[in-house]
Amino acid sequence: MKIRNTKTIKENALKTTSFAFLLLIIFSAFNFAGQMPDKYKRKRIGEGVTLLIPDNFVEMSDEEIATKYFTPKRPLAIFRSPDRKAELGINSSIFEWGEVGLESEMNMELLKGFYKGAIANSFYEKIKFLNEGEIINIGDREGVLFEFIGAIPEDPNAIINKGGKSRYHQVLYSVYNGKVLIVNFSVTGTDYTYWQEHATKMVTSVKI
């Protein structure tokens, strides 16, 4: 009798654990689905630049940007997903590139080589290029599209070392008002396969 009761208890515990695990999977799936873009709206950024932004993305405030990014030049805009894992940033370079009004005549191979080197020498410990620089048409001019995963180095001062993380990027560079326009989508590396199609839609939707 005792053996039978013990067996029954184990079976019930196993069923309860399995059910709880199933609920966790279902909840996680619904929670992740809630982060993915469903609808887009075209939004004007700065002067003469528009692109598609997911309806559920939130524009980051000046305080949020200042807290997360230590940069003397504020980006034109940064939008984030509800769970804060994915971001779409729009910015322009601090230096000049070419002449205003001659954007359609800019040498994209030169731009491609410059920014491929800049990406390779960024703060990431290791870079894996998925697209090493594709020259694409965006309206009346061209741009260079990169796709890569960057490995974030481990923190040597951490008490508990959880291992390095990674971040996925799709970045478009083009010339805008004599400077370089930068459209950068990024998300945690573990989630990037779910975001690739959406990222391409956002980044390549830019109109100048």
Image (cartoon, rainbow, N blue to C red):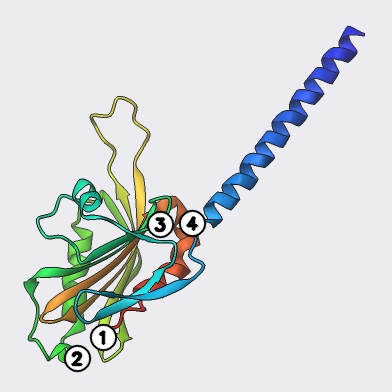
First of labels 2, 3 by sequence position: 3
Q: Which of marks 2 and 4 is in front?
A: 4
Q: How far apart are marks 2 and 4 (CA)?
A: 37 Å
Q: Given contact means CB atoms under 8 Å apart, are the residues at marks 1 and 4 in contact?
A: no
Q: Depth check: give the residue in front, 130 or 27.
A: 27
> On the image, which quarter does residue 140 sit in?
bottom left
First of labels 4, 3 by sequence position: 4
Where does residue 3 sit, x and y in percent of width and height?
Answer: 87, 10
Q: Residues within 10 Å of mark 2 (few under 14, many from 20)?
A: some
Q: Residue at x 40, y 53 (%)?
A: 189
Q: Given contact means CB atoms under 8 Å apart, are the residues at marks 1 and 2 in contact?
A: yes
| Residue where numbered disc 4 is placed | 35
| Residue where numbered disc 1 is placed | 142
Where does residue 59 sit, x and y in percent of width and height?
Answer: 31, 60
171 vs 113, left or right, is right
Where does residue 61 sit, x and y in percent of width and height?
Answer: 25, 55
Q: Depth check: give the residue in front, 117 or 95.
A: 95
Q: Residue 104 carries which label?
A: 2
Q: How far apart are marks 1 and 4 (CA)?
A: 31 Å
Q: Residue at x 36, y 37 (%)?
A: 163
